[in-house]
Image (cartoon, grey):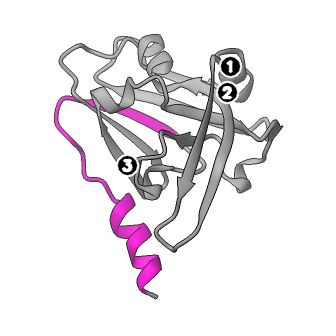
Amino acid sequence: MTDSVSLSIGGDVERPACLALAELRALMDAELVADFHCREGWSRLGERWRGVRLRTLLVLAGAADAAGYVTVGSGEYTAVLTRGQAEDGRVLLALEHEGAASPRRAGFPRLVGPAEWDCFLSVKSVDRIEVTREPQQATAAAIALARLER
């Protein structure tokens, strides 16, 4: 990963933050092993990811108790999670895959979660997290499914 990676956390939080790569690495607190199933018809079993739990980042920023939604974005691509989904201990902002760090062009930091998630929720090159009381518009499903229709 390059040192230019940064992640902003904002919205309904007490302590908005902009975290550099070194800061994200210092927060790494979890590993996830999960199957990944793509709607294109392929699967990868037992993928191993290491990173920081999304709930750790929400605590760091002081997410408001009344905020029920977390939007994770990369450019125009956004996935909206309920607060319950975001605080699931299996939901990570991954910085490593199969023991290796990857540059942003390969999709890191990357939102990953349990095997039952739709594949389009695995947001690559995450650049922002926004905590809100109402759900924002999610574009992930529309963008990902449009690719499949081509």
Dot 2, how many residues are within 10 Å of its Cα: few (below 14), some (14-19), or many (20+)?
A: some
Q: Mark 3 belongs to which amino acid?
A: Ala
Q: Mark 2 belongs to which amino acid?
A: Ala
Dot 1, how many residues are within 10 Å of its Cα: few (below 14), some (14-19), or many (20+)?
A: few
- Tag 2–tag 1 contact (CB < 8 Å): yes
Can you identify the residue that label 3 sits on? 79
Number of labels in the image equals 3
Can you identify the residue that label 1 sits on? 23
Q: CA distance from mark 1 to mark 3?
A: 23 Å
Q: Mark 1 belongs to which amino acid?
A: Glu
Give the secondary structure at mark 2.
Answer: strand
Mark 1 or 3, closer to the camera: 3
Residue closest to the eye, 4 or 107: 107
Residue closest to the eye, 90 or 54: 90
Mark drawn on residue 20: 2
Magenta part of the protein: which range?
128-149
Q: Residue 40 in the image: x percent, y percent?
A: 51, 74
From the image, which quarter does the N terminus lie in?
top right
At horizontal 66% and vertical 20% (from top left) the residue drawn is 28
Location of residue 93 with respect to 103 vertically, above or below = above
| Mark 2 or mark 3: whose residue is earlier in sequence | 2
Image quadrant in which you'd find residue 2: top right
Q: Residue 3 in the image: x percent, y percent?
A: 78, 35
Mark drawn on residue 58: none
Q: Is residue 92 left or right of residue 65?
A: right
At horizontal 77% and vertical 47% (from top left) the residue drawn is 103
